[in-house]
Image (cartoon, rainbow, N blue to C red):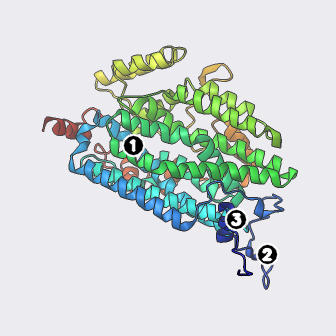
Amino acid sequence: MSANQRKKRLNKKDAYKYMTRLGWDTTYQKEEDVFPYTNMEGLKIHDWEAWEDPFRMTMDSYWKLQAEKDKKLYSIIDAFAQNNAQKNISDARYVNALKLFLTGVTPLEYKVVQGFSHAARAFKGEGAAIACQMQAIDELRHFQTQVHTMSHYNKYFNGFSEHTTMHDRVWYLSVPKSFGDDASTAGPFEYLTAISFSFEFVLTSLLFVPFMSGAAYNGDMATVTFGFSAQSDESRHMTLGLSAIKFMLEQDADNVPIVQKWMDKWLWRGYRMLGLVAMMMDYMLPNSPTSWGEAVELYIEQNCMALYKDLEKYGIKAPTDLINTIVAEKGHLSHQVWNIFYNHTNAAPFHTWMPEEDKMNWLSEKYPDTFDKYYRPMFERYMELEKKGERFYSEVLPLVCQTCQIPLGFTDIEGGNPHVYTHKTSEYNGEIFHTCSDGCKEIFDAQPEKYVQSWLPPHQIFQGNCGGATIPEVLKWYKIEHGQDNLDYVGSPDEAMWNKLKNK
């Protein structure tokens, strides 16, 4: 018999460790010079090997999985185009939800490619670096598939072709853009908290589920398909977010207050940005599967609070004040955001309109305590002006929040003053800065040296940095065709194209 015994086969966990953990240390350079961002945020990391990878995915299995998903996705996109499936959507009004997604969400997918690539380089631990590298590739794929899917609508409807330019320039798109810029200019651990945890784990369902279910209810199966194609990626992203939080909290007790501050900050920043989604859910979808208020009940009041409860053992506390504000606003937010856009759609790259009677009744049913009392009378007044040929468009530039960059159009719901706009101020270096809420004011006051640098569209227009001082000059700089890409839906080229398509 041979004296050599067969070596025991490694289990999957050990095999994955040997394939993905290089385990090298710096020699001729100082570690702090090679990884300068690791200690900049004050976190204490004692053991990088404690990073957990629940999916244990290697690059060979990753590429195989993604290739199979792409093959299925693009075959469906081709079939969608060949069968003229743009005729199957419920109404051309729905297309404005796609314009909102393409200009507001899709560029963020590309932005986080840069952010995760930077975080991967910044981390000393291979587990964290590999997870960030894979997410960077995921987000690039999401950007590409979303653009390819929605490019079909560009053949028939306005407002799609200049989406990259619009993201950089249009006033309301500074809201998601500032979110991405704020996160990517933070340190790598705060970046993971902002994107992987607060957005991917806590808030991603408030973004993707409404868009994908809305697409399904309105006959847009191509958009539904790219959502499903990204879903397995999102599962890994959510797991990365939770792994990152637990890793930071378990490394040292001194990390807890730092992580708590980040979690609270990015919960509020993400929620404020998702006001765009609230408006889309309740107003832009001809057929609405659910309301923003119902989504908040499920994803914030139940899921988010349960998550914070699970983290109590580490010393994390639920941000009661922020949650109370979000819950108090759930019956008002979508209506107030739609009102902002209805007033300023002369400078936005999509159409708005007043809801028809069926939609009004649906809103009354979904918001029995608020809609008929506060918003139906205002909308009916707008409708009366429309009938007189006096459709209202704001001709003045709004004051926007220094932190979230949304116009100050929210009211003091939690304070019991739904008719009074909230307006907070902070002083820094002898200047006064304006914010829309206590949440945004607290974020500004914590890092004023960062937020005083915010690129605020009204300020930039007044300074002559946006093509000129008049609306026509600004629209030309935005690459918005006045009367084609914007204004009211009724009488628009999109409505005319829809009627033509349906009559063929």
Residue where numbered disc 1 is placed: 224
Q: Earlier in the sequence, mark 1 or mark 3?
A: 3
Q: Callout 2 environment at 10 Å: few (<14), some (14 to 19), or many (20+)?
A: few
The residue sitting at 45% across, 29% down in the picture is 282
Q: How far apart are marks 2 and 1 (CA)?
A: 46 Å
The one nearer the camera, 41 or 453, is 41
Residue where numbered disc 3 is placed: 14
Position of residue 130 relative to residue 485, above or below, is: below
Q: In which quarter of the image is the C terminus?
A: top left
The residue sitting at 76% across, 65% down in the picture is 38
Q: Residue 31 carries which label?
A: 2
Report the residue that reaches farthest toward the right.
253
Q: Callout 1 environment at 10 Å: few (<14), some (14 to 19), or many (20+)?
A: many
Of marks 1 and 3, the one in the foreground: 3
Query: Given contact means CB atoms under 8 Å apart, are the residues at marks 1 and 3 in contact?
Result: no
What is the x, y in percent for residue 448?
72, 51
Of marks 2 and 3, the one in the foreground: 3
Q: How far apart are marks 2 and 3 (CA)?
A: 27 Å
Q: Residue 372 carries which label?
A: none
What is the x, y in percent for residue 132?
62, 61
**SS at circle 3:** helix
Of marks 2 and 1, the one in the foreground: 1
Q: Earlier in the sequence, mark 2 or mark 3?
A: 3
Q: Callout 3 environment at 10 Å: few (<14), some (14 to 19), or many (20+)?
A: few
Position of residue 201 relative to residue 26, above or below, is: above
| Residue 187 visible in image | no
The one nearer the camera, 54 or 296, is 54
The residue sitting at 38% across, 52% down in the picture is 473
Q: What residue type is labelled 3?
A: Asp
The residue sitting at 34% across, 46% down in the picture is 222
Q: Distance between the residues labelled 1 and 3?
A: 38 Å
